[in-house]
Image (cartoon, coloured by chain):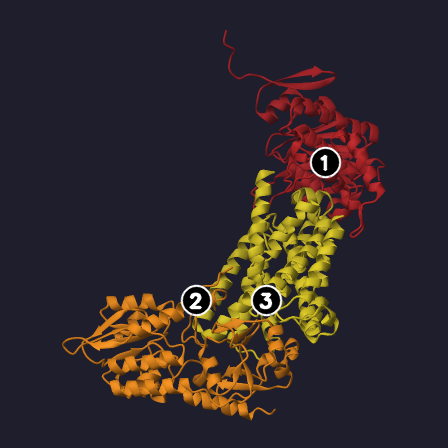
Chain colours: A orange, B red, C yellow
Amino acid sequence: MALARRARPRSPISVPSGVGVLVMRGSAQRTHLAVLVATLALACRAGSRPAPGGGLRVVDDAGRTVALAGPARRIVSLSPAITELVFALGAGERLVGRTTWCDYPPAARAVPSVGDGLNPSVEAVAARRPDLVVLYRSTLDAAAARAFERLGIPAIVLRQDRLADLARAAALLGRLTGRARAGDSLAAALAAVGARPGPPLGVRLAFVTWDNPPVVIGGGSYLDELAALAGATNVFHDLPAASAAVGLETLAARDPDVIAVLGDSGAAELPPFARRPEWQAIRAVRARRFVVLPGSLFGRPSPRAALAAAELRRLLAAVPR
Amino acid sequence: MDGGLILEVRDVAYRYPGAAADALAGASLAVRAGEVHAVLGPNGSGKTTLLRVALGLVRPRAGTAAILGRPAARWPRRALARVVGVVPQREDNLFPQRVRDTVLLGRYARLSLWGAERPDDYAAVQRALERCDVAALADRWLWTLSGGEYQRVRVARALAQEPRLLVLDEPTASVDLRHEMELFELVRGLADRDGLAVVVVTHHVNLAARFADCVLLLAGGRPAGAGTPAEVLVRDTVERVFAWPVAVVPFDGRPQVIPLRQRKETP
Amino acid sequence: MKWLGLAAAAMAALALAVALGPTHVPLGALPTSDIVRTLRLPRAVLAFGVGGSLALAGAGLQALVRNPLADPYLLGLSGGAGLGAVLGIALHLASPWALPLAAFGGGLAAMALVYRLALLGGGALDPRVLILAGVAVGAFAAAVTTAVVSLSEPAELRNALLWLWGGLSGASWDTVLVFCAYAPLPAAVLLAAARPLDLLALGEEPARHLGVEVEPWKRRVYFAASLLTAAAVAVSGVIGFVGLVVPHAMRALWGHRHRPLLPAAFLAGGTLLVLADTVARVAVAPRELPVGIVTALVGVPVFALLLRRWTAG
């Protein structure tokens, strides 16, 4: 039987490409701590300084130093969050490649797709003749980044799991595209959003992404941040992992007021597990107190976090008591 | 129906699917209670095929095979096992087992699907063990037995079925002289004392001649001789069938076949 | 007496499963607790039934294919069930029973395919051909499953893999009822096959001469073991090692006769899975381990011990 492979410790809810990576269990706490330390260490280093002669040199989230001769003109983004950021920086016309999962903003769909982001097709990316490739920080990025290096294409790896990561990414991308001011202000905006939890709604919430076994979102994740921003409490905030399988008993005991599930936009129906007999032990299921979060907005960390938090707050407030 | 006729095979012919020629043709066998019949012949002469036809495992192309008057192929397995005990040539026991347990397996055909073994069954097992002179080995593991002892245990298992006909297929392969004699004496005793009908397929021409009432000699699937050992085992016939010069010498009232050396003796 | 010990172990395991859990329920409150009645109790009962079924099917299959390394999944059932489940998820089947039914259907398809392939070698069900066909079908199903997973929306299918690893989260009294209405028939067939299996251990020819209808019994054992396994996988994913190790452990205590061995394997398999599920639920509370991991972690050392006994003895 296959053994669990170590996933990146704080994974977004929806991994933007087709990889059967299994959620890591156990040792999440240790990894979380290690990551925290590493992040703080990197935060001191990851920045950029203009190299002599007008070139740019940055250190990315994987500790790699990447040098560009000038602002990037042909960018391939291998993550939906980066695609959104690039457009938000006003540099959307410089995007020459995106993943199949990059669907926002609508203008992004006009950009040719190069396939998966997590396990990218190096050929497809190279065919776009980019001068910068932006990768998502995961266990697979090292191999891909090396492949691009060998082809002489600058590749940077950015962590994109939480708002703080996105803020940093915005600033970095701003410098790399020569739109430093836009980048810095976007970074500041994102940081500000993240720093300001919304007024308490008095709602206790659980995000359930799978039913058998029940998989919930824990404190290490973007959705957990959104819950705080919306003024709600994630009953599994104490779990360090981004997502974890828990027992139904635990879910019943923690007794959330509302259960949030990810779904297609517009789908207002009950999730399938709502009708299963063993789930009726949970009060929120019995009372049918669900919110369905559109995957395009909530499925991954996004610069539209403020919008997402507001939408979440609205949906939660709309659930009848 | 002849009262004592247990097995009657008449003029059977059988061809394996896809074979060019008959593996067996015109063979007959009539075995009565208390008789020991030996089926002899070189390799490939159809002895095993004859057994298969006689026991209803395959249907003959021509001729009939009947057990207790009923066509062999029509006997359900379980019912047949209550009448015929077979000691096949090969057995491949997967698990370590004690002698008593392996003999107990012989009671299968007399047990009901869910029912447990009854005192009758254990008594039958004990009798079979004693008849085969292996009662002293009853609690031993099979893998500790010698070849001859193991063979007698297998005969005991067949006896535990309480059959009327006992069939042994090459029982003395890989068994030493003493155990060969013990086995044939046992078999003879079963026929004489207990009225069992016995069919032995064997390579051992001389032992068959000593112990059997009737002999069927097969060559190329066809009978080369059928009758008493003295009638069948004459020099010309034996030389023709086995393709080797022999001398036939009487011993104890029975013919014994002595193969001759081909090369001249060196002076 | 051994049977009393086994029964006591089973009772103790069930008691532990009801009393222990990620949330603390005081002993006095157990009978009236909602959590216990709707979640823990059906889950314990289902675990017992599934574990027992897997061990029973494993013992039967080991005898059928004359191979002590056989387990219920050798014949491609887990591959087929996994493929059924993954397809069910990929097709967004809406019903809450979609996943178990899809897995069951996949298992049955694998069973039928393996049977058909095994007959290619002639009319009889040759154990060696059966094993080869099972491995081939299992590998094929696994390959198709991987292809489906790699081409689809990753979040859903990652979770499908979690399901495949085995878990009793879906246990409810409804599931227990369905399983208990269905499982006794193939289980009874296997128990009835105890003596024929003893005789088959001598070889097919000797068994035939001793009165066993060899081909019909082989078919019955094959289908009964496969149906039991498919049902177990449908409700609880692929839980390994129970079907492989428990029969061997029971043989060490009860010998090879299947009449005592099969029921003992059922009881021991049930006990083992109930204990493993309890560990899965409380070891890393509030999180849950997939129970298949626990059975593997327990099963491998036990297997190593058994191997030492064999090679030493």
Label placed on residue B99: 1
Label placed on residue C167: 3
Proximity of marks 3 and 1: CB atoms separated by less than 8 Å: no
Q: What residue type is labelled 2?
A: Thr
Classify mark 3: residues with Cα within 10 Å, few (<14), some (14-19) or many (20+). Answer: many
Q: What's the residue at 77%, 45% (across, down)? A: B109
Find residue C303 and report its horizontal and vertical position in percent: 58, 49
Kindly tell me whether residue C100 is visible in this rendering.
Answer: yes
Q: What residue type is labelled 3?
A: Gly
Q: Which SS class for mark 3?
A: loop
Q: In this view, does B140 lie above or below B177?
A: below
Kindly tell me whether residue A130 is visible in this rendering.
Answer: no
Callout 2: residue from which chain? A
Q: In this view, does C198 lie above or below C142?
A: above
Label placed on residue B262: none
Q: For residue B11, which quarter of the picture?
A: top right
Callout 1: residue from which chain? B
For marks 1 and 2, give the CA distance: 61 Å
Mark 2 sits on what residue?
A31
Callout 3: residue from which chain? C
Q: Is residue B157 left or right of residue A74?
A: right
